[in-house]
Amino acid sequence: MTLRFLSRISSDQLQRHGGIYVSRRIQNRAGVGIACVALTFLSITLWTIRGVHAAVQPNASVSQHYVSPLEVVLSPDGARLYVLCQQSNEVRILNASSFALIKTIAVGRVPRGFSLSSSGNRLYVTNSWDDTLSVIDTVTQAVIATWPVGEEPSSVAVDRAGNRLFVANRISNDVAVLNAHTGKEEKRLAAGRGASYLALSPDGDKLYVTHVYPNPPALRTGRENRTAPESAITVIDTAQAAIVDHLLLHDIAGVFHLALSADGRLGVVAELHPKNLVPLAHLEHGGAFVDTITLFGEDVGKPVEIPLDELERYASLPFGVAIAPDKSRIYITNGGSEIVTVVDVPRLLNYIHTHAEFSALDLSASSNYVVTRIPVGLNPRGLTLSRDGHKLFVANRLEDTVSVIDTLTNRVASTITLAGSTTTTSRTLNEKAFNIASNVVEGQITCTNCHIDGRKQSQFAPTPKDLTYLIDAHKSYLADSLASSRSKQISPLRRGEQTFYTSRYSFQGQIGCANCHIDSTFDGITWDLEPDGFGRDIVDNRTLEDIKDTEPYKWNGNNPSIPVEDGPRTEKYFWRSENYDNRVLTYLAAYILNLPPRPNRFRPVNGKLTPAQARGKAIFERTVDNNGKEIPVFNQCAHCHSGPKGTDQRSFEVGTRKVTDNVGPLDTPQLTNIALTAPYLHDGSARTLDEIWTIYNPTDQHGRTKDLTPEDIHDLAEYLKTQ
């Protein structure tokens, strides 16, 4: 997520910002055929229109107003389309037929989810950085109440009677149950680490809850950092406001939206299946992630994980899910691949029931049930179907558009452009130009000859003569359209954000930065990143929040800057291809270095520490232990964890290395929002802050802590949470 101020950096400022200078890198790539060579000019033009590679003039102003549509929902009568705009902190109400803007309603900071009451007269919005819920009267089209909820509220659902609200809170890891009329909180229900998304069953009896970070192991085994991640769907009885079941999701870390069929017999959830126990050097042997959905409900029996990927046709970062009213199709947005995956439900169920055993890692499976993959805008997220199922609305977060898909043809019928304070409807130029590109190879070939769905390179030779009739019919249209269509100028930071969330730079389009850094933060798991053998140099994935001026990077401190960390190293070990030019890398580095920290919920508003925090601060800053012995400077907490971000930017040997580690001294990590980023230590072996000292500091090298009581350790942890 990016706040509005991130767009206010000019190109000149960008070159000076943080000393970011990226040397020009020469890319020598062999062509893949005469058609691709001939299509180069058109491809660049099309991507320029889409706003990824367009040049930024050095002296031009790049201050822009972005809205970043994240979620969409239709009113019960289908007349209005509500669009949740995360970066502009507002809800836009559109006419669902003409797409004309009806009203813009300001809400809280960084809204993440919203939901309509069954009557449609109330719209509830979760404001994730304000820890509040905005209540909108859809008749008067105004906010009528703002209620406090849990920490980082991310999604909300209303029971069928309209009496209770359920709010998923990402940081407090729970669901708050509120009185829908007064906002008074009734209770909290534990719902997994990073509780985020909700779906109500058609009869309203059950509420299903997902969480974006894997649950920590319940018991310490000493192998926590080498255990496959575990997640679950929490099932809540809405009448009793009580948890009645957990649907376990093995090997899953990153669970997003879910949906249920109209008859209630089929549920679907979008998720990530990381292969973090295998060295990332094996990326080219099938990927570091599997993009999957899990089916549950009476139609399938026990939960079944289903892959969406196909060789050379990956469905990176599944997020939003919708099921057709007649249960014929499942639609999944894939934010990294910039597509909507369409699944044939009867074929899928038949495949499940006729295959006693199959693997979620099978790249041949999806061809049995995936109907098509529809190209949409940049970073598609939330989606919603019209009542008859004929229209599918998709929020393209990093393009400020909403794609309107005709589900009968599986094509984008129109695109709603949300530009600043206005809303316009544009023709789907990109798709049309892609399919009728008649001004290439003397009119003998189009983009779709080789790239049949906008992404996949076909395995057969084109037949040029079958396409020559397009020359006269479309040449003038295409030239005029390309000449007259220009996207608004895009700021460097916005371009960096687009690069961060796309998967197009990696080998076969498998992964992007956002796979491991969910919503530009972290993923809560450990990885075997280096090609140095199985189980060597296991590393915890550190958060990206507020990392400017905390260099060097990487746990061994070998990368002196973000351009080095995210340039050559990322391309070599993650993308398996050289793709960033100097400009794209500069944009990406600028975006990462400008990521702000989320609000710290543990820091007192008035600045006065609680008694426990004050005692912890004294321990953190002490120079003498409880036995009256002087603590050497190099072993004092405040010596290494100094400065405004809790790091002196140096490396030390602190006694936490394992026999599986090849590295020497470890980089001192920053302490920003450390309460949110478990597990801890360089290899993620400590489940909690307390375990850093109670279990993994046997030689007292990581601060002198043997003299501390359990109460002291608790107080120290409480103080660290305020950082």
Image: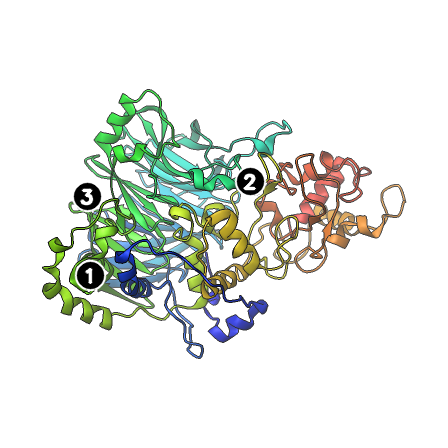
> Does the rendering let one see residue 655?
yes
Residue 518: x %, y % from top left = 47, 47
In the picture, residue 342 is in which quadrant?
top left
Task: Give the number of the disc on residue 527.
Answer: 2
The mark found on residue 437 in the picture is 1
Q: How many labels does the image show?
A: 3
Q: Do the residues labelled 2 and 3 touch (CB within 8 Å)?
A: no
Q: In this view, does 325 lie to the left or right of 305?
A: left
Three-letter amino acid code at the position of disc 3: Gly
The three-letter amino acid code for the residue at tag 1 is Ala
- Residue drawn at x 28%, y 32% is 203
Label 3 crowd bin: few (<14), some (14–19), many (20+), radius 10 Å: some
Q: Where is residue 281 in the image (x, y as percent from the top left)?
A: 51, 41
* SS for callout 3: loop
**How far apart are labels 2 and 1 at the CA level?**
43 Å
Camera-nearest label, 2 or 1: 1
Q: Earlier in the sequence, mark 1 or mark 3?
A: 3
Residue 389, numbered circle: 3
Question: Residue 187 location, x and y as percent?
Answer: 48, 37
- In the displayed structure, 136 sits above or below 581; it is above
